[in-house]
Image (cartoon, grey):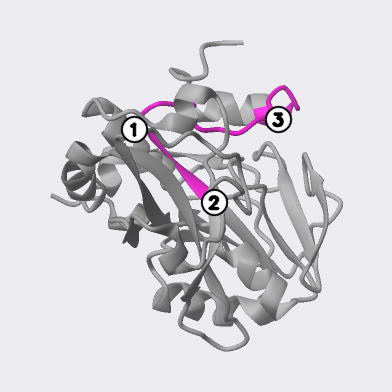
Amino acid sequence: MKNLTLAKPFEVREYIRKGEIQKPTAGMCRGYAQGNLVVLPKELAYDFLLFAQRNPKPCPVLEVTDVGSTEFKTIAPGSNITTDIPKYRVYKKGILEGEYTDIKSFWKEDFIAFMLGCSFTFESALIEEGIGVRHIECGSNVPMYITNIKCKPAGKFFGPMVVSMRPIPLNKVVKVVQITSRYPDVHGAPVHIGDPGLIGIKDIDIPDFGDPVEIKDDEIPVFWACGVTPQAVAMKVKPEIMITHAPGHMFITDIKNHELAVF
C-alpha cells in the first residue's frame, strides 16, 4: 500500500472499497478535502437541507446527490457512497444500530446523500503554517463533544451543536483563528475558545466522540463546529433511518483544500 499521506483520493477510496483501510482518515491524501456523510430518505431531505442552510457552521454542504444515486458526481466522480468510507454508522429512530464497513445492504432507491465540509481540510493549512495538530501527531481521532449550543431548527430537525477540539499554544491562537477563518465551507473560525464548561462540556478528558488528547500547560482548548452534529440531531429527532460516517472516518473528495479557501 502506498504512503496514504501522499496518495490520491481515488486510490484511497479504492483501498477503502476493498476493505484494506478501516481506520480514521485524518492525515490521508494531504491537500485534498474530506467530508462528513449524511444519508436520509427523500421525505426528510428538504428539511435537512434547510437545517444545513440555517446552520452552515456545523453543516456546510459540499454536494447533494440525486435521489437514489450512490455517486458524488461533482466532488468525487466514480465514487460509491455505499463503500468508500472506512466505517459508517446506522441510526434507526435515533438509536445507533451499529457500525459497518459498507452500507450496500441498507441502501434504498429513495435515499439522498449529503456531503458536509470537514475540519480536516483546515488542519492541512495549520500544519503548513507550522502549527501542530495533536490528534494527527498521536495517530488518534479528534475529540468531539456535544455542547449546549442550540442549532437553529428547520422542519423536523433540531438539536445541539457538536464541536471538535484542538489544543493550541496561547501565542498561536490568533494565527489559528485567522487561518481557519479562510475556510467557511469546512466549519471556518472557532465557535469557542477556552473554558469548555461555558459550552456545556463537563469533562474535557471524556469526549462524546473520538479520543481524548493531552492539553499542555502552555495551551488552550479551541473548539470548532463539527460535522458530527447531525448524529447528535438524529438522537433527538429519531428519524426512521439516518446513515452517517463514523466519527473521524471521512469521505475523501477530489477537491483540493485550497479550492475551499476564501482570500
Q: Is residue 79 left or right of residue 129?
A: right
Taking the spot 58% from the left edge, 42% from the top edge, the residue there is 248
Q: Tell me the element at label 1.
A: helix
Taking the spot 57% from the left edge, 77% from the top edge, the residue there is 159
Residue placed under numbered mark 2 in the picture: 144
**Residue 44: x and y, percent?**
65, 79
Q: Is residue 19 above or below residue 262?
A: above
User: Which of the marked residues, 2 or 1, is nearer the chain's N terminus?
Assistant: 1
Amino acid under label 1?
A: Ser
Q: Is residue 24 magenta?
A: yes
Alpha carbon separation for disc pair 3 and 2: 20 Å
Identify the mark at residue 195; answer none if there is no mark.
none
Nearest the camera: 23 or 67? 23
Q: Is residue 154 above or below residue 205?
A: below
**Residue 154: x and y, percent?**
52, 86
Residue placed under numbered mark 3 in the picture: 22
Circle 2: is it few (<14), some (14-19), or many (20+) Cα within 10 Å? many
Alpha carbon separation for disc pair 3 and 1: 21 Å
Nearest the camera: 100 or 45? 100
**Residue 88: x and y, percent?**
72, 47
Q: Main secondary structure of the magenta part?
A: loop
Q: Is residue 22 magenta?
A: yes
Residue 95 visible in the current orientation: yes
Q: Nearer the viewer, mark 3 or mark 2?
A: 2
Residue placed under numbered mark 1 in the picture: 124
